[in-house]
Each structure stands twice: as structure tokens, then as C-alpha cells.
Image (tube, helix red, strand yellow):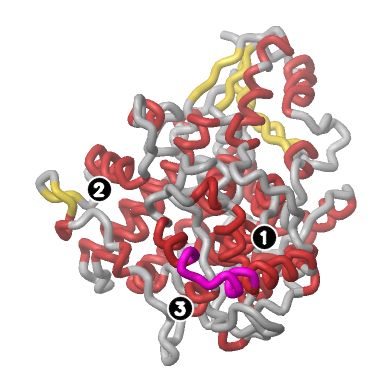
Amino acid sequence: MKKTLRLILGDQLNHNHSWYQQVDDEVVYVMMEIRTETDYVKHHIQKVVAFFQAMRLFANELNQNGHQVIYLQLDSTDNKQSFTENIRWICEKYKLEKIEYQLPDEYRVDQELKLLSDELKLPVKEVDSEHFYTSRTEFAEFFAGKKQFLMESFYRYMRKKHDVLMIAGQPEGEKWNFDSDNRKKIPANHTIIQPFLFHRDVSEIVAMIQNQGVETIGEIQEKQFFWPVTRNESLELLSFFIENCLPYFGTFQDAMTTDAWSVYHSRISFAMNVKLLSPKEVVEAVIQAYRSNEHSIALNQVEGFVRQVIGWREYMRGIYWMHMPDYASLNYFNHENKLPDWYWTGETNMKCLSHSIKQSLQFAYAHHIQRLMVTGNFALLAGIHPDEVDSWYLGIYIDALDWVEITNTRGMSQFADGGIVGTKPYVSSANYIDKMSSYCGKCHYNSKLKVGEKACPFNSLYWHFYAQNESLLRKNPRIGMMYVTWDKMQPEVKTALLNQAEYYLKNINKI
């Protein structure tokens, strides 16, 4: 029998993978912390720590279960800081004759590993990561021959195929989508449940990262690291979410407030994206709680959550593998501006952006509406280059991996793909932010004003965006009413709005 080296990537911590069902003395596993992964963008310190801590604990568990594991820390003198070069010397040293790896979720890693056989002159075998509901190609096969890739169509297909919230072939509650019930603002007298946090000392890893000169962003409480980094912790957090947050999740999933940084969101996206939890077990646990009637969970809460996991998550992955690598260079509006300096500090007079960015720097987290309708909305209105936006999102959020980040950011948030993901740009004036948050009442700017010293920048930038991109957007049936409104404005009103927007764009680092 040929002795085999099996590579485990940092986002492949799947305890239930078939690889580990039996101990094989002819198999050696390798895991590695390498600079190509820490340095391709400037990551949040909590993100780097979470990956390294979770990887180390996963390797320890494999060892305890009898598997042979080689683990290369970032500061190891043997570490060549490359997947290929580390695999090369390990195979030579231990006389390994065959390489196996689970299919990576990121295109750049996939391309590197595809060259292993040629580089090392050894047989290489790919296996599935056994995590997702869908294969890499299932999405493309479903939409073969179609010009539009409607998430709703894919979501219904997934519900039917996997019999999720279905009764006799029909959607439970006689509706596929309860989104209209899930757009509530947090009431003034509502007390939000405090998030469940872990307390782990990660100071040793933090010191190593700093000593190795890895550039990071954000803050960390290194003696009270609160993210789940083991399977048991991930299951604990899932249970807390189901028992305490799920009954309110759908209703308030779009709400933003300065009183809570995670509201009723699950915060299990990191655990899922490194595969400590599988989407199937998460969905099944949520539905089981709904069916048990122990927690008085309404259908709209459950459907809203299930749609995020079985719909959006699998949909975004499908878009990624169907359209990469070209997707990473799409720039529909030819935007060229740089991110404002305050995206790295939160030091802006706009309360919504200040709070969302400072929260992101403090917790490596913001929920989907903060990302889409605050930081993403502003970046699109301000004409920021999609590369700048991609790098910021990919670095600052603990759950951001290329396969899920780029489709959400360059696609849904920035409309840089010209409509592959979304049927219209997700832009808004201050009105939406005021409706869904507590930000505007505490802001330096007035959300009602469109021009003048205290006018909210979102208002003039909103109309400036539509004016600048009229040739690309006017015929879009979903936003035609915006141009009807624009056409009805008096010339002097239009001029004032555009001048106000230009002033903000020229002084973007001071607003």
C-alpha cells in the first residue's frame, strides 16, 4: 500500500468527514499555518486567531483519536510558507507516495492544488469536503440555458429536493417566503437578549502572530476570546441561538441598533464556514425546535433563517464556481474611487457608518444589513472600486472567505457583476436606514435633509448615483420609478443635489 499524505485546509475542520472514520497507519495528515493565507489581504486579528486556534484544536483531536498528524505552526523553522513547498519536503522526508486533498472552497487555492501532481510528480486525488448541500456544479446545471439566476427559483428547488419545510409537496404555511414579515425595527421598549460568549485565552497565538510580523486590523481581547473554535462550542452556540434568539430572528433580522452588536443573529457563520458545523445539521436542528413547540417559534422566524442557509449560502457558492475567475474582475459601473480612510477607523460623523465600522473592528462582525445597506450602500453610492470593497470585507469579517464574500460584495452589494446576483443595485437614501435603525436620531447629520451643511450624505449621493449611471440603469424595470421621480424634479433641485454630492465626494475623508 502506498503511504498517503492528506492535506487539511484551515476551513476544512469537518469532524464527520469519512476520512476520519477509521485510523490508517499508512495515512499522514498535514495542517499548516502559512503566510500566503495570512497575507493575501489584511485580516482582522480575531479572524487569524480563530483560524489558528480552531486548526490547532482540530489537529489535537485527530492525534488523540490515533491519527498521524503533522502540524506546521506559522513560526516553525520547517515551514516553507506554501502549500506546495511544505507538501514537497514532507513527502520526501517521510517517503510518502500519494497525496489526497478535499476540494477547496476558494478558487486561488483550488488552482494551486491542481498543479500538485505536475509539481511533485506524485499521484494526487481530490475528494469532496462532504459539507455543502450541493456539488460545485449543481447550481450551473440547474440554471443551464437560462439568462437569469434567480435565487428564489434555486431556493424553491432546494426546499423541494431536500424536503425542507414542505408538506405534501407544497411549502409549509402555503408560502415560500415570509420576508414581508421580517422587516421590523427594534421597538423602543424592547430588551434584546445579550449574546452568549466564550472566554478563551489566546494570548500565545496573538503573540506569535505579532512576532511574525503579520499585519492585521481590528481589536482583540486575547484573554477572553469569545468566538467558538471547537465543534462542542459551535454546538453550544447553535443551541443558545435556537433557544433564545430564533423566536425573534426573522422579525428583527434586518434591524440595526446601537444597543446590541449581534441583535438576534446566530453568529455561527464562522463555525459553518470552517465546517465545524454542517448546514444540514443546523437546518435540521432549527426545524426540530420549531416542530417541538417547546420554544414557541413562529414559521416566519424559521423560514427566514432556513432561507439564509439553504438558499443564499448555497446560491452564492454556486455563483462563485460558475463564474470564477472572471467574476473577481467585474466592475459594471467602472468605479475607480478609493475607500475613505475612516473605513479603517470608524471616525466619521455619520452615525450608521461609524457604529457599523467600529463594531466590525471591535468584534470582527456585522450582520447582513449593516454590511449591505450601510457600509456596502455607501461604498456603491461613493463609486468605490470593487477591488477596494472586496479587500475590506474579506479582511474585516471573521466569516469572510472568498467564495461567499466576493459574490455578496462584488455581486449583491456593489452590483459590479451587472445583475448576475441581484436584479437591481441595493442602494438607498437615509430613509431606509432611519426606518430600520436607531442610528439617525443620534447622528450629526439630519436624515430628512437633502442639501445643506447638515444634510445626510446618503440623500444626495443616492440621486447622484442614479444620475451618473442613467445609461446603465434607466431601462431596469425594478428601478424605473426612480427615474420617473428624477425626471419630475426641477432643474435647480437636481443641480443642488448633484452639487451637494460632489462636495461630499471631494471631501469624503472629512464627512
Q: Main secondary structure of the magenta part?
A: helix
Q: Quadrant of the C terminus?
A: bottom right
Which residue carries the number 2 mark? 164
Looking at this view, name the residue that lies furthest to the bottom. 189
Q: Write the residue at 41% across / 56% down.
A: 480
Looking at this view, name the residue that lies furthest to the front. 491
* Label 1: element kind: loop
- Does residue 273 appear in this view? no
Cα separation, mark 2 vs mark 3, equals 32 Å
Residue type, numbered disc 2: Val
Residue type, numbered disc 1: Ala
Residue 263 to residue 32: above or below: below
Q: Nearer the viewer, mark 2 or mark 3?
A: 3
Q: Write the residue at 27% across / 57% down.
A: 177
Determine the image quadrant of residue 77. Answer: top right
Residue type, numbered disc 3: Lys
Q: Earlier in the sequence, mark 2 or mark 3?
A: 2
Residue 111: in magenta span: no
Apparent side of residue 269 relative to residue 31 in the rendered image (left or right): left
User: Mark 2 and mark 1 in contact (Cβ < 8 Å)?
Assistant: no
Residue 501 picture location, percent across and down? 68, 68
Which residue carries the number 3 mark? 435
Which residue carries the number 1 mark? 382
Residue 147 to residue 229: above or below: above
Residues in magenta, as a range? 486-495
Q: Earlier in the sequence, mark 1 or mark 3?
A: 1
Residue 37 picture location, percent across and down? 73, 40
Q: Quadrant of the N terminus?
A: top right
- Classify mark 1: residues with Cα within 10 Å, few (<14), some (14-19) or many (20+): many
Count of numbered labels shown in the rendering: 3
* Label 3: element kind: helix
